[in-house]
Image: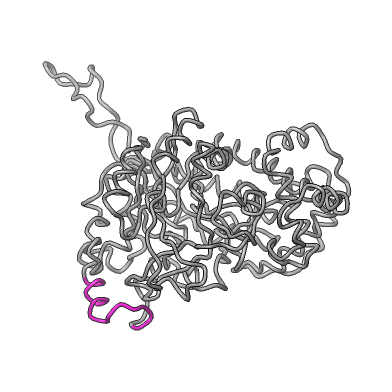
Amino acid sequence: MDLPRASGILLHLTSLPGRFGVGDLGPGSDWFLDVLAETGQRWWQMLPVGPVGAGDSPYASPSSFAGSPLLISPDLLRDDGLLTDAELADLPEFPTGRVDFDAVSREKTRLLRLAFSRFRPDAEHEAFRRRADDWLEDYCRYNALKAHFGGLPWDRWDRDLAERDPEALRRWDEALADEIAFGRFEQSMFDRQWRAFHLRCRDRGIGLIGDIPIFVAFDGADVWSHRDLFRLDPDGTPTHTAGVPPDYFNELGQDWGNPLYHWPAHLKDDFEWWSRRVAAALGRFDLLRFDHFRGLDACYSIPFDAENAADDRCAWEPAPGEALLSAVREALGGELPLIAEDLGVITPEVEALRDRFGLPGMRVLQFAFGNDPLADIYLPHAYVRRCVAYTGTHDNDTTLGWFTAPPGSTTQPIEELEAERSFIRRYLGPGWADDVPHGLIRLAWASVADTAIAPLQDLLRLDSEARMNTPGVGQGNWSWRFRADALTPELRSWLAEQTAVFNRFNGEVPEAYRTRLGKPTEDDAPAGEAPTPGGPGTRA
């Protein structure tokens, strides 16, 4: 897959400014689209947009298909006549720099229930139900049952419900009919608002990059409604979970708690669930980052009773990545618009799988300057065109936080830390060593990589307080937000200028940022000389 030379910003929707305590699909998203268009960006990359799960994580969603009700805009519900100005004027006071997920969830649920009381199903709602009939009812059932059972995971519900006995489902569908209907309403409103938002993106020439985690949460509608697709014992308990082995950053490895897939069942139906999952995500996004791509070649398997991921029984188990990607590509009509998240210790087999399907990989500048044996491939002069260059990701500290972290705050020895920072200053050169966040953005934008992405925190030069996620820490993540006035005219102008200078500007370059004179015509050329093909033109 070949992508045009372009750039973009990584910013989750929840981080947008707005009066409801969390960013959503309302006016704040339109404002940020204008910023992206003004600065010549082509891409807006986000984290998963499903309902958040444990620890408010978008990567632990109870559904691979549903949208997050937190992202529904009350302003747009008012525009639809489902809420009033007076009802939106009486809001709690929310923090401006962080999402208080509990408070936001309470208030948005209150407003959504009020809107639901006035909603009458229309043709658009019924069309959505038909499009989503392969997942919607099970998800809404799951949510209603989980609330009824006090938030218990599905394997601790009544046994007949955990095992999805048809008669039990019918009884509970009747008993919880109102709550199930409310769930349908939430998903219908999310779909309606997202589709309108996606159209506005296309009108501005902005593409959306989404994120598809390879694994799903155990306590969710996916596993409950498709137990045969996962490695569970007869009681519904996972036999093995996914993670990564011990490494430089974590001597015990990581156990993510996600159940591993039962691959024979997926092979039997030609990866039908996977094809539906990817197609649904591409209904919302133009390009998808496939998280933990190496898991398509082999998954790190952790026995459920293991104390940690360093247990001697843990092992890499092969996965049918080629068959899966081939089936999904065929289901999508021959296209596979994916970015392979190929970070960490990647084997030749993983690289071969990525390249066999023509997928761009990832290069992260924060990984380029240390003592890791793989660091050299992350240096910009070693990039290839078919890759996406990042200053950092949602799992990294901000660039300023990373560069200024005090000794001892990581496992890195002090002498290595000092050598790394010295290398960064020398690599950036005079003039940029004192502005490392912008220096790294400039390196990414200047690189040969077709696509360059920076988290907004790096454009804003923010420190560790603005970090989105710290892997292995269960609480306090995913909550960062910014104020609109932080994106000053000076920062926007700087970003537009760098985007133009390095020939990534999306659309016509404004006169203020043009780097070359108008292309000479034959009339302007000296006698006996023809204009130089591809000579000075108006592109940046």
Q: Is residue 372 left or right of residue 247?
A: left
Can residue 410 be seen in the rendering of this structure?
yes
- Closer-to-camera residue (348/363): 348
Count of numbered labels shown in the rendering: 0
Residue drawn at point x = 21 percent, y = 51 percent: 382
Pick out the residue farthest to the front.
234
Quick check: can you spot residue 468? no
Residue at screen point 57% across, 39% down: 276
Determine whether 453 is above or below 306 in the image. Answer: above
- For the record, the magenta segment spans 408-422
Q: Place residue 292 in its image quadrant.
A: bottom left
> Vertically, is 160 above or below 136?
below
Query: Was residue 165 drawn as part of the magenta stretch in this picture?
Result: no
Q: Position of residue 378 (x, y in %)?
A: 27, 57
Q: Position of residue 132 (x, y in %)?
A: 68, 39
Image location of residue 280, percent across then percent down: 59, 40
Q: Provide residue 530's location: percent of width, then percent of height.
A: 16, 19
x 28%, y 31%: residue: 537
Secondary structure character of the magenta stretch overall:
helix
Residue 310 location, quadrant? bottom left
Q: Is residue 521 left or right of residue 139?
A: left
22 is higher (above) or lower (below) than 538: below
Give the quarter of the figure containing the N terminus: top left
Coloration mode: one colour
